[in-house]
Structure formats: structure tokens, C-alpha cells
């Protein structure tokens, strides 16, 4: 790829993410919910192999971009709608994380995670800052003192190529470039956007909302995910690594108060350090292996292919991303600007034709 398609090489750390490989090669097909239908499977495996999924250079109705043949534009298009994909991820992540959090000891077994709770903040009564959330068990061994741990999910666009890349250190450079793209979106979630004044509400400073969450003893963790399934550093720390590269501090002094973000710094520090839940899958694996329960099975979650909670959970998260991204790419075909006389575009027919090869006898 580096020699023949250098324009794609900077995407390699994202494409090699194992999360989106699980649904294709490593999940048990016995449960019907684990099976991908033909169109999502074709889209997932072709994007994993960096093969075309769209005709090249079709004008987009956004007016200033063309649809590339790999579908990357669909994840950053102004006219595209990520809401359905976002909702699929939120619902599936809530289902997948609940057993792992219970095994790690943060919540009681069979406790569902809440999806988009209405918190009734004084600064913004209509705000729903959390896509999924849970309340840690205060009696657990982790002694997590926070009332609510919430996640704000963000589907990012593909990272741009790095400005400077030397051959000797190219892999480290493109990996850092992929993480910087995800960190930039993490930053935008903690540096919450302001709401302009309306007929019913005054101007709402985004940092005021973050500050109210902080003083209510809550935690906001941005869950950023790129188009190929690479997780942002804060999501990765929540799941496995327990730490991540630090963010540049937000401004706390500026002549314009709209740029003041002191509460973003406080929330970032709270979400990045214990006793905030970090490395939950690592804790779940340890507890699973040390369990002496007579009902303990060899495979977690009855999966038959996942001997640990971490593998089982990552499989479910990858399956969710495959389904959500396939939905997003299918809806992106509605933004194709085709000639009036052109027939309606059939994505499945296009993909199956692309996958048909002549067999020489």
C-alpha cells in the first residue's frame, strides 16, 4: 500500500483496527443477532480491504465535494445524516457494556445502561449530554464516588494525511495522526458548543453545562470512533488501557468569555483519572478468571468463541459498528447527484457486479 497507493497509507492504523474484524471472521454465527446480512457484510469487508464501494467521483448534493469510491466522504458530508447510525451504536453499546461493567464490579448484574437520559440541568433544561450512562454501585470494591458516568458518542471523519512524514518513522507518525484526529473530536465534546439565544431561552455557554455536570458529581467521557472503527484515546482508556496521551489544556483566560473553558479542564481531569472507571475490560477479565462460581462457563456470554469478557465485548462493539456504518453508507447514496435520466442507483447490484470475476476454464 505504501508503494502503490500512498494516498491511503495514512489510514492504515484505522483500517487495521481489530474491532471491525471480529464480525467478519471471529464471531459465532449460531446466534442470529451475530450474523451480518449480505449488504452490510459486503460493505464491511470491502472497506476493510480498502476496495471500492461506490462509483468514483459522483457529485454530492452538498455542492462542494465528490463522493469518493471508498465512501470516506459519507462520514463528513454536510448533507449526510448520522443520526440512525449514531442511535444504533448507542443502543448496541449499552447492551454490550452492561455485562462487562457488571463483571468488572461497577454495576449490579442485569442492570441496563440508560440511553439519552434527561438530566434537567438548570443551565440547559433540554440538554441530553449523555448518549449512554450508568450509575456506579457505591458499595463495590472500586469505590467510585460519582453519581453518573456518561458517554457522548461521536462518529468522526477520516483523518487527513500528516503534513510531514519521514520514511524512517512513518508508522509512528500515521498512528499519532489517527489519534490526533480522534482527540480533536474528544476536545470538541468536552469544549461543548454554545447555544445561541432563542425566543424561549437565553444564550447558553457550553462550559456552563459542563460545569453543572461536574458539580453534580457526574463524569462525561467522549466516545469518538473513526470511519474504520478505531477508538479514540479516552474510549480506549475506558475499555482497556487506563491511560491516554494528554490533551492540550483549554483556555481559562481570554478577553472574550465565550472562549473560557475552565470546566472542560476539570471534567477532562476527572474522566482521565481514577476513581473514574478505567480499564473496565481488564478488570472484567481478572474477575472472570478469579471467579469460583459453579455456574461459570468457559466462554463468556455463551459466545462459544470468546473466552474472556473483553473479547466478547469487543466482538459486540465491532458488530454494532459494522451495522451502523453500513446503514450510514446506504443512506449516503441518497445524496448522489445523478443526471435526471439516470436510473436509480442500486448499491447491492453495484457491489455484486464488482465482486463478479471471470473464471477461465
Image (cartoon, helix red, strand yellow):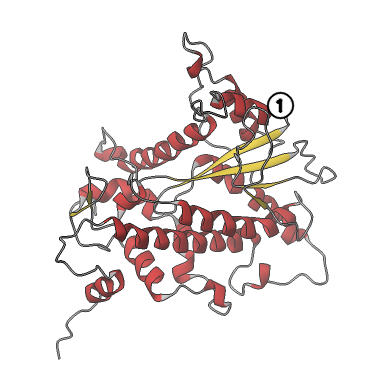
Q: Residue furthest right?
A: 139
Name the residue tied to disc 1.
Answer: 215
Q: Nearer the viewer, residue 276 or 12?
A: 276
Looking at the picture, how far across and down is residue 129, in whole percent?
59, 39
Q: Residue furthest bottom?
A: 361
Residue 160's x, y, as percent? 30, 40
Residue 246 position, x and y percent, is 52, 29
- From the image, which quarter does the C terminus lie in? bottom left
Residue 338, given in percent of the width and then of the height, sits at 19, 59
The relative height of residue 176 versus residue 42 in the rendered view (above or below) is above
| Residue 349 against residue 110 in the figure, above or below | below
**Residue depicted at x 51% and y 35%:** 189
Within the image, what quadrant is residue 142 found in?
top right
Q: Residue at x 49, y 18 (%)?
A: 258
Q: Image point 54% across, 27% down: which residue?
A: 206
Q: Quadrant of the N terminus?
A: bottom left
Q: Residues within 10 Å of mark 1 (few under 14, many from 20)?
A: few
User: Residue 205, located in which quarter of the rendered image?
Assistant: top right
Side of 315 relative to 332 (left or right): right
Residue 12 visible somewhere in the drawing: yes
Element carrying mark 1: helix
**Is 335 situated left or right of 293 in this image?**
left
Whether residue 299 appears in this view of the structure is: no
Amino acid at each position: 500500500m505504501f508503494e502503490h497507493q500512498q494516498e491511503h497509507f495514512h489510514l492504515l492504523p484505522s483500517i487495521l483496527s481489530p474491532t471491525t474484524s471480529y464480525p467478519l471472521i471471529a464471531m459465532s454465527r449460531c446466534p442470529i443477532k451475530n450474523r451480518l446480512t449480505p449488504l452490510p457484510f459486503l460493505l464491511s469487508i470491502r472497506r476493510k480491504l480498502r476496495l471500492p464501494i461506490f462509483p468514483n467521483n459522483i457529485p454530492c448534493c452538498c455542492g462542494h465535494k465528490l463522493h469518493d469510491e471508498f465512501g470516506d466522504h459519507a462520514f463528513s458530508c454536510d448533507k449526510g445524516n448520522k443520526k440512525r447510525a449514531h442511535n444504533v451504536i448507542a443502543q448496541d453499546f449499552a447492551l454490550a457494556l452492561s455485562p462487562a461493567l457488571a463483571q468488572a464490579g461497577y454495576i449490579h448484574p442485569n442492570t441496563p445502561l440508560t440511553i439519552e437520559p434527561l438530566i434537567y440541568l438548570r443551565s440547559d433544561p433540554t440538554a441530553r449530554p449523555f448518549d449512554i450512562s450508568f450509575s456506579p454501585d457505591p458499595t463495590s470494591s472500586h469505590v467510585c464516588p460519582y453519581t453518573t458516568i456518561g458517554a457522548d458518542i461521536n462518529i468522526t471523519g477520516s483523518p487527513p494525511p500528516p503534513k510531514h512524514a519521514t520514511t524512517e518513522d512513518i508508522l509512528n507518525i500515521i498512528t499519532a495522526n489517527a489519534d490526533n484526529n480522534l482527540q480533536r473530536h474528544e476536545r470538541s465534546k468536552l469544549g461543548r458548543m454554545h447555544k445561541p439565544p432563542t425566543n424561549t431561552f437565553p444564550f447558553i455557554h457550553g462550559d456552563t453545562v459542563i460545569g453543572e455536570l461536574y458539580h453534580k458529581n457526574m463524569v462525561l467521557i467522549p466516545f469518538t470512533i473513526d470511519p474504520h472503527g478505531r477508538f479514540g484515546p479516552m474510549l480506549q482508556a475506558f475499555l482497556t488501557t487506563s491511560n491516554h496521551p494528554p490533551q492540550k489544556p483549554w483556555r481559562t483566560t481570554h478577553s472574550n468569555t465565550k472562549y473560557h473553558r475552565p470546566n472542560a479542564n476539570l471534567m477532562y481531569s476527572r474522566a482521565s483519572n481514577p476513581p473514574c472507571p478505567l480499564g473496565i475490560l481488564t478488570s472484567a477479565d481478572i474477575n472472570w478468571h478469579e471467579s469460583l462460581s459453579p455456574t461459570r462457563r468457559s466462554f463468556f456470554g455463551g459466545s462459544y468463541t470468546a473466552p474472556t469478557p473483553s473479547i466478547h465485548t469487543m466482538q459486540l462493539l465491532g458488530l454494532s459498528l459494522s451495522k451502523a456504518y453500513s446503514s450510514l453508507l446506504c443512506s449516503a447514496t441518497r445524496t448522489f447527484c445523478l443526471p435526471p435520466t439516470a436510473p436509480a442507483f442500486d448499491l447491492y447490484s453495484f457491489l455484486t457486479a464488482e465482486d463478479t470475476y471471470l473464471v477461465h476454464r
